Each structure stands twice: as C-alpha cells, then as structure tokens.
Image (cartoon, grey):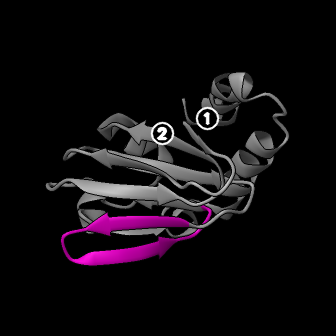
Amino acid sequence: MHASTGHEPASEWFLPTDAIIRIQLDGGAMTLRTLEGRLDLPCASIVGPTSRAFGTTSHRGVLVSVGIRPLGWTALTERQADAYRGRAVDLNDVTSGRFVTRLLDRLRIVSDESFLASALDEALKPLL
C-alpha cells in the first residue's frame, strides 16, 4: 500500500511477477509504465502475469496492491491468466462487477489505513 499526499506522486517498480490487483482509492489517477510506454489505469485494475519489470505511479490518494497467485486467479475468474500476460485491464473485465463493487465499497469505508489489510481479508473471503 502506498499513500500519496500533497503534490508528490508515489511510484514503485515491480520485477516480473504473478498478477496484481491495483486499487486506487480517493479518485487519484494511476499510471502503468513499461518499456512500450505509459497507460492510464481505472481505479480498479489488474495487471496480468508479467515477464518484464513495470512501474506504477499513483498521483493522489491511497494505492492498494494485492498479489494474485495461480490458485487465487482460479478463484477470481474462469478466464485464463495467459490471456492477460503482460496486460493491464479494468478489473471488471476479468471478474464480476459485483465482486469489484463489494471490494471497492469495503475499502472506501476504511477511515484508518492501518485497517486496510483486515478490510481486504473481509472483501476477499468469498473467494476462499
């Protein structure tokens, strides 16, 4: 989790990895950077499995990242992870809108960032 307060964006780089859900709370913009260029992401997105490093920048608010292992991917969607390899898409394109709405609603009501982990556990529990 990263919080960007004030005018300075929060950036991080990832080595090749399994899929990652990215949630931008507080309505700020989120950008993905790769060797090919930049892509603006919606507030709830998923970056499929990658074979290259990539970076993200959050321009305002709180950015929550959730790593998704193969078993978690299977619980999240019936779609094949390879179809999303090296791609970033709206989370609604991969899973049900009902799940995304429940996830966002649960995270947005957290008033203290120290409780985000337990809110994620609660929101992801139906997938277990």
Instruction: State which mark lies toward you, 2 or 1.
Output: 2
Amino acid of disc 2? Val
Task: Name the residue that disc number 1 marks.
Answer: 124
Q: Report the span colored magenta.
A: 30-43
Q: What residue is drawn where x is 67% and y is 47%?
A: 5
Q: Quadrant of residue 59?
A: bottom right
The percent position of residue 67, horizontal first and vertical second, equals: 40, 38
- Majority SS type along the magenta span: strand
Return the residue nearer the eye: 56 or 73: 56
Say which mark, if any, is on residue 50.
none
Dot 1, how many residues are within 10 Å of its Cα: few (below 14), some (14-19), or many (20+)? some
Task: Name the residue that disc number 2 marks.
Answer: 66
Q: What residue is drawn where x is 23% and y is 61%?
A: 82
On-image quarter of the N terminus = top right
Between disc 2 and disc 1, whose residue precedes?
A: 2
Secondary structure at badge 2 equals: strand
**Does 40 lie within the magenta span?**
yes
